[in-house]
Amino acid sequence: MKFHWLIWIPRVLMMLLILFVSMFSLDAFEGNHTIWQKLLGFFIHNIPSLLLVATLFITWKKPLFAGIFFIVLAILLSIFWHTYENPTTFLIFTVPMLVVGILFIIAKYLK
């Protein structure tokens, strides 16, 4: 049985996670700042999303590398931002990245 479609599941999930993280950058447009300060804040808030997009683009054709990278990134995210202290934050940000990493590895070995 061919599993060509299986590689798209982690890709789409990662895209959805990137969109979800990007949604939080919209709060940069609140307040009494100039438009340039708001745009700068918006860009700064989107740096993690841009890095995730770049990572997904670089690892697009390398599912094993993508899987390992996203698992390591989830662990580092949990340690650096202490998402392990709050179960909700852990479930929203860390677990999806772990799942994506595992799905990339599964897709690589079932291909």
Image (spheres, grey):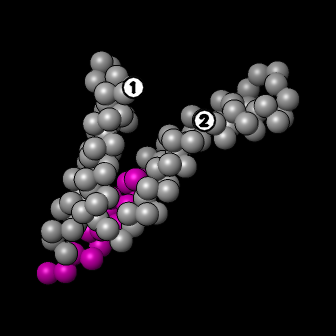
Q: Indicate the secondary structure of the residue bearing disc 1.
A: loop
- Above or below, 59 relative to 33: below
The type of residue carrying mark 2 is: His
Q: Residue at x 28, y 24 (%)?
A: 84
Q: Which residue is mark 1?
A: 81
**Residue found at the far bottom of this picture:** 1
**Residue found at the far right of this picture:** 34
24 vs 83, nearest the viewer? 83
Q: Which residue is mark 2?
A: 45
- Could you say where residue 59 lies in the image, as x and y percent from the top left? 38, 63
For label 2, the crowd category at 10 Å Cα-Cα, with few meaning under 14, some 14 to 19 and many 20 or more, is some
Q: State which region is magenta.
A: 1-16
- Above or below, 75 relative to 2: above
Q: Residue at x 21, y 68 (%)?
A: 108
Q: Residue at x 84, y 35 (%)?
A: 35
28 vs 48, nearest the viewer? 48
Quadrant position of the N terminus in the picture:
bottom left
1 vs 63, nearest the viewer? 63
**Marks 1 and 2, the one that precedes in the sequence:** 2
For label 1, the crowd category at 10 Å Cα-Cα, with few meaning under 14, some 14 to 19 and many 20 or more, is few
- Could you say where residue 72 lies in the image, as x and y percent from the top left? 28, 44
- Could you say where residue 73 lies in the image, as x and y percent from the top left? 33, 43
Is residue 14 covered in magenta? Answer: yes
